[in-house]
Image (spheres, grey):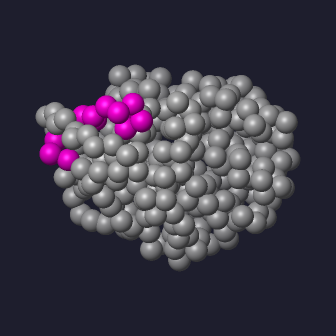
Amino acid sequence: MKIEFTKALVTGGAGFIGSHLVEALVSAGSRVAVVDNLASGRLANLAHLQDYIEFHQNDIRQLKTLLKVAQACDVVFHLAAVVAVQQTIDDPVGSAMVNEIGTINVLEAARRNNVQRLVLASSCAVYGDDPRLPKNETMPPVPASPYAVHKLAAEHHARVYGELYGLKTTSLRFFNVFGPRQDPASPYSGVISIFMARAIADQAPVIFGDGNQSRDFVYVKDVVKALILAANSNDSAGKPLNIGTGTSVSINRLWDLIASQAGRQLAPAYAPARAGEILHSVAGIELAGSRLNYKPDYSLEQGLAETLEWYRDQR
């Protein structure tokens, strides 16, 4: 993909989404600096890129480091965060220091270094339990967890930095992102990574509830595409935009697809539904389409096939 900047800073660049973004930026010819404390990111995700990037094992709570690393950068992609909802519930203060104060530090480093644009990774979690579908950006956010509150607060901080200081910021609300490098061993993994691991091991998965709950699963390469489009865009500053596919699939159907691609015939086990789980979610992506010319390139089946191939290679 064509880029209109020469150097980028990616916070959280050793993580699942971040490492795919770094890979795309390097392929497009950008110089890339990465800041990651490796709390959840992995150096192995960047091993094939180590000769082409500047890697800084630091924490976004350390403003002094960010000020130095952001020098000469045209754009900042801010993906570093405590992303585990349960962790933000168990440790609301510590996680807020990363997700809110850390975000302010990143914004401040961008401002002081005259960075042209900042793209923030937000989340569909900001919509909370609102049952209306599809989720669209005009709906009032009703966050239902500390994590969702942090993401909404980060959006507002980014907007205010734009209004006060002229920093062009865009917040992208990711829906259910999946793809290679998503760790199925983590208790906070996405359902697709867990299903992949179970299918490859020829083990039945556990589905909570009746499996009819549905989600909008978006392939990581389409998310990377959206991030780069936002960095190139002059028509998205200050606006939150949904990034998904505009379609949803039930968890039962998801398992059927993965099992079929893996050549398995395994009936899932069922467990009681999780308390407070949102039954259905799908992104309205019209605004991202008009502002960014965003349109997903990957069908669910195509994304699953590439992801399954990666998990097989890992095994």
**Magenta stretch: includes residue 83:** no
The percent coordinates of residue 193 (x first, y second) are: 43, 39
In the image, residue 127 sits, relative to residue 45, either above or below, namely below
> Percent x, y for residue 229?
64, 64
User: At x 84% / y 41%, what residue is drawn?
Assistant: 52
Residue 312 location (% of width, % of height): 52, 37
Which one is in front, 94 or 179? Answer: 179
Residue in the picture at 44% in, 26% down: 185
Q: Is residue 199 magenta?
A: yes
In the visual, does 41 lie left or right of 1?
A: left
43 vs 236, nearest the viewer = 43
The structure residue drawn at horizontal position 17% and vertical position 36%, both measured from the top left corner, is: 270
| Residue 4 visible to an observer of this rendering | yes
The mark tally for this picture is: 0
The residue drawn where x is 58% and y is 55% is: 221
Q: Which residues are magenta?
A: 198-211
**Split into 4 quadrants, where in the image is the N terminus?**
bottom right
Snapshot quadrant of residue 188: top left
- For residue 13, side relative to residue 142 (left or right): right
Position of residue 42 measured from the top left corner of the image (x, y, whole percent):
62, 28
- Residue 275 appears anywhere in the view: no
Instruction: Describe residue 174's horizontal placement relative to residue 140 as left or right.
Output: right
> Which one is nearer the viewer's eye here, 238 or 286?
286
